[in-house]
Structures are given as structure tokens and as C-alpha cells.
Image: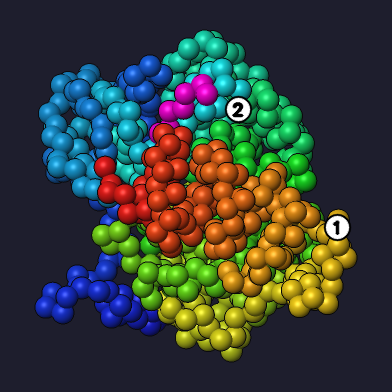
Amino acid sequence: MVSFLRCLLPLSVLTTACLSERPHDTVPELLDVRRDYHSYSNVRDFRTEHLVLDLAVDFERRVLEGAVELNLQRLDAGAAELRLDTRDLDVAHVETAAGKGDWSPGSFRLDARDAILGSALRIAMPPGANRVRIHYATRPEASGLQWLAAAQTADRRHPFLYSQSQALHARSWIPLQDTPQVRSTYEARIRTSRNLLAAMSACQPPEIKRDGDYFFRMSLPIPSYLIALAVGNLYFQPTGPRTGIYAERSVIEAAADEFEDTEQMLKTSERLMGSYRWGRYDVLVLPPSFPYGGMENPCLTFVSPTSIAGDKSGVSLVAHELAHSWSGNLVTNATWRDFWLNEGLTTHLTHRIMEAIYGKRRSNMERAEGMADLQRALAEAEKPGDRALAVDLRGRNPDDTVTAIPYERGALFLAYLESKFGRTTFDAFLRNWFDNHAFQSKITEDFLAYLDAKLLRAHPGTVPLEKIDEWIYKPELPDDAVLPSSEAFSEIETQRAAWLEGRLALADLPTQNWSVQEWRHFLDLQPDALTREQLVTLDRRFNLTLSHNRFIACDWFKIAIAHNYQAAYRALEQHLRAVGRMRLMVPLYKELAKTEAGLTFARRVYADARPGYHPIAQTAVERVLSVPAR
Ligand code: BES
Ligand code: ZN
């Protein structure tokens, strides 16, 4: 194991040093792979063990106000300062205490604000002190919260608030050690108006009393990016003994139908990865402005309503967030450089769950889709180092570097290992990885060392170390990667070619049986592949401009923009105003930004749509449209 690390570590550092674009006169600081460069917290001196939140939700002022208490493990008896992460918080006063002793007023200082990291909060710690209480309020512009007016919700009658803490946003609503290296349990009291329900990433009985005063307890240690809160006019409907849906009234029925297989997904996951440790698994459907498809908040996955398509075409999203209950929530990436450990393993497990429940035809389509996404992301990567799995993110915002690469290259790496060692052996390996590191945070090199000890050495000559090195640290995909192939997609390609070349009439395409995945593959064309006439007939026959499926609509709008097909622009504008899920709108702004006229249109639409977007999505669009950041 030691020799393995000796072999890999210098290489990784070397790769980083060679690829970084620093001027030649400064020697790049050696990368410390165990350090989280995205937190100010002094984790070698103190570690949060338990956190107590007490917050009141003020929809009028758009602030959360109250206090957080941190119970810390003191690792260094001499440490005189606790450094926490914050962003845009108003800290009123702090208190400190030692053990069960009384609280005494404490002194603190807020450092200058860094655009990516926020402001360090420095609290003076008297000898022996191991508890702090911070009285604070959030600001309306908190990067990790979205405050929605009633009009922006499905039912349009009540306001809505939700958090999104990953990657660096927990610090915008709680002052804490905002690093995935630190895990803590938590409890919370949330006060809001009587008619609203609060929900958190903590197991709550579905039959909770709706009285505006809610208590939560997460008794398993989790990293800060998994602390989550939502408040709205939410209702609950079960989908099984351990699973259910929280949503607004008007969407709950459709959501419960769409996600009716959740309980079965949970059982399948347990068969693959071992027992589910979190008690309940519920899904909370958010308003359409939610910037992601889903977020794996423990016990309570958050999802975008855009995946509720009426035909279960988007349910792999739930399989994905559920799989995170092992890859991410049970064993967590220790730094954002190791993000692929969360997402790559999860993507691999998602395919396994989808295959077990919906069959190989479906899961192969999804693998092939992932491969196409990967190829695009590799081509668009900002710098060669970004095409690797372990990425040096020093000085960068982890949100800005989320691409298909950690997901799909990660999954491809695991599919490669699975093909080499066989399914049974590789499944057992992954299951042991989770069991042996449960409730720990791990870096890439920990995974590699475990892989080396349990698989590579146990099966000598099967996979050489250099291969692993290529997968993790090199920009190029190894040439013996096992590429997915989909029979269903090959059929689509044959039919599409026949139509494009005039050998087959549009009416003769067997579209009645096409799934959303097949439609999307059909539309996955080169920008200039269609003649104007083909574009118009396609739209007339299949009404693509008005497609009810947000994914098909988005793919179609990309084609429409590339052809300046004005007939779709009204629907495009409506789509951009209605949907805040980044994956369904940032690519459209990118396509629009390619021409002067498109950019003008995009900027006008964005100016109106902006208040409906989450702060994270606003930042993403503003990068594309070169709108100066606020
Ligand atoms: N944890 C991610 C979402 C995320 C990533 C939030 C990085 C903040 C920073 C979640 O599990 C995820 O991967 N969501 C995907 C879903 C998809 C792959 C099925 C998304 O939102 O696109
Ligand atoms: Zn994920």
C-alpha cells in the first residue's frame, strides 16, 4: 500500500504542477491532497461533533434569525481560536462554554469577504472551552437559500423557502466548519407560520403536527453540505413503508405515481450495497426554480419537478439520489477535489439499480447517453487537468467545475474495473468499501489504496497500476475503456439516417413506441444536420416546440437556436422563465450567446427571469452572458 501511494502521489502532484497555468516565475505550492482548500476552519484544533440550530423563518424580510450552538471536540488543548466559515451573515454576538459550564460572552471577528470562500469568523476560545453559541441572521441574498413568493410555487398561495448547501453554501445560512471532512449530528428547532410545514434532512415521522413549530434530529454524523431545510405548504403521501413524497398539493399525486417504484429501488440498493442506514427515504418535490435535478439530502432527497414526466422517464434521478445514501452520504468525499468519488460511484450504482428494475435496454440507453455527455464535456473542458477525475480546485469555485466528467468518467472507470474483475467480485468490493468506511470522509488516494489492497493485489496481472493512474490523473481516456453501447440507440441512428437521406418518410418512423431517451437520441444531431424544410416538417408533425417533456423541449430548443428557427422562440422564452434547473436552461443561454441577436434576446429574457432563478443559477447564467457579477 505504501509503495502504491508512493507511486501515485508524486505523479498526481506532478500532473497538477505541469498543468497549472501559473506564471513560470512562481513555483506552484505543492498540493496537499488531504487539505480542504475550500474552508477556513481549523479542523486540526477543533471538530464539530454536534450542532443545535434554532431558527425563525421570516418570509417578509427574507431572513432566518436565531442561533447555532456547536459542540466541539478539542484536538489541541492550546488552541485559542476557532475559525468558522460564513458568507454574508450578520453575527450579533457569540458565547462560549466549557463542558457543562455556563455560557460566557465571547469575542469574535469577521474577516474580509473572499468571493469564493466567504468570510472567516474567528472566535476567541478560552482554555478548555469546547462549545460556542452564535446568534446571527442570514441576508436575503444568501447564496444557499431561495426565498420564493407565492406566485413562484405550484399552488401559488403560500411562500416557499429551501436551502441548497452543496458545495459551499451551508456557510451562507449557518456559521460552521463548512468542510466535508467534518461530520456532525444535529438537532434543529424551526419556527414558521402555522399553515406552513418545515422539513429537514433528518428523519421525521410523516404524521408530524402542523403547528409552525418543528423539531428535527439527525442522529448520524453527516457533513455540512447535507444539512437542508425546506418550508412551504407541503403535504405527504407514502409510496411504501419507508418511502414517501413531500410536495405541494397540486403536484403530490403525479409525483407519487411517477416515483411509485422508490421502495423497490431502496430494496434493490440494499441488495447491492448493504443495509440502508438512514431510516426513512422520502422525496421532496421543489418548485421549478430548483437549480439541480436532485440533491441527496439524507432521509429527504430534494428533486426538481421537471423530472416528473408522467412516464417514469426521469426516475433514474431518484435512483441516483438514493444511491448517494451509500456513495456520498455514508462515505463522503473529503475534499471537492474528490467529488468524483461521490458522483462517479453514484452514477455507476444508478445504472445497476436501473438495470435491475427496468432492464438492460433502458440502462444501456442511459449509459450511452452518459457517454455522449462525457464526450461533449471532455471537448469543452476549460483546461486539460479538468478532464481527469481528481481535479486541483485551488482558487476555483467547485460549483463552476461541475460537469459530466466526474459523473460519467467516474462511472466508466468503475465499469472498466467491473469488466476486469467480474461483477460478483467488484460488487463485493464496493459493498466492503462502504461497510469499512461508513460515516467517514475519504480522499481519492484512500480509495485507490483500498482498491490496490483488495483487488489489484488479490488478482495480480489483471489491471496494472499505470491504468489506474491514467483513469484518475490523466486528461485522456484510457484506450481500453469499455464504451457503452445501446441497441435501441443504434436502431434510432439507422432510422434517422434513412430519413435524413430521404429514404424514409417522417410518417414511417416508428415514433409511437419511442421513449423519451429515444426521442432525445433522435434529436442529438449536429447543429447543421437539418435543412430548414426538415426542421419545419419535424416540428409540424411532432409538435416539438410545445413538447410537454422538458428534456425533449430543451434538446429541440438547442436545434431551434442553432437554426434561428423563430417559430420556437416564444415557447423558448416561456421555458427559460419557468425552469430554473441549470441543466435545462444554461445550455440554451450558451447556444443563444453564440450570436449577437441571440445574446440580445438572452439578456432580455434573463433580466425578467432572474428573480425566479436560484442565486447559484443566476451566477451560472451570468457567466455565460458575461453579465458582471454582483
Ligand atoms: N449532489 C448532486 C448535485 C450537486 C452537485 C449540487 C454539485 C451541488 C454541487 C446531485 O446528486 C446530482 O448529481 N444531481 C444531478 C442529478 C442527475 C445526475 C441524475 C443533477 O442535478 O443534474
Ligand atoms: Zn449526484
Give residue 513's mark. Answer: 1
Nearer the observer, 588 or 341: 588
Q: Is residue 130 left or right of residue 12?
A: left
At 53% from the left and 18% from the top, the residue drawn is: 158
Residue 251 location (% of width, % of height): 68, 29
In the picture, the quarter occupied by the N terminus is bottom left
Residue 319 visible in the shown view? no
At 21% from the left and 27% from the top, the residue drawn is: 91
Residue 294 location (% of width, % of height): 56, 45
Distance from the alpha carbon under mark 1 to that under mark 2: 31 Å
Residue 250 sits in quarter: top right
Residue 218 position (above or below residue 221):
above
**Amino acid type assigned to the residue bearing label 1 in the image:** Asn
Residue 380 location (% of width, % of height): 45, 70
At 55% from the left and 80% from the top, the residue drawn is: 456
Q: Residues within 10 Å of mark 2 (few under 14, many from 20)?
A: some
Q: Is residue 138 left or right of residue 358?
A: left
Give residue 75's mark. Answer: none
Residue 595 location (% of width, % of height): 43, 61
Q: Is residue 571 left or right of residue 37?
A: right
Magenta residues (range): 145-151
Callout 1: SS = helix
In the picture, the quarter occupied by the C terminus is top left
35 drawn magenta: no
At 59% from the left and 89% from the top, the residue drawn is: 461
Circle 2 residue: 154
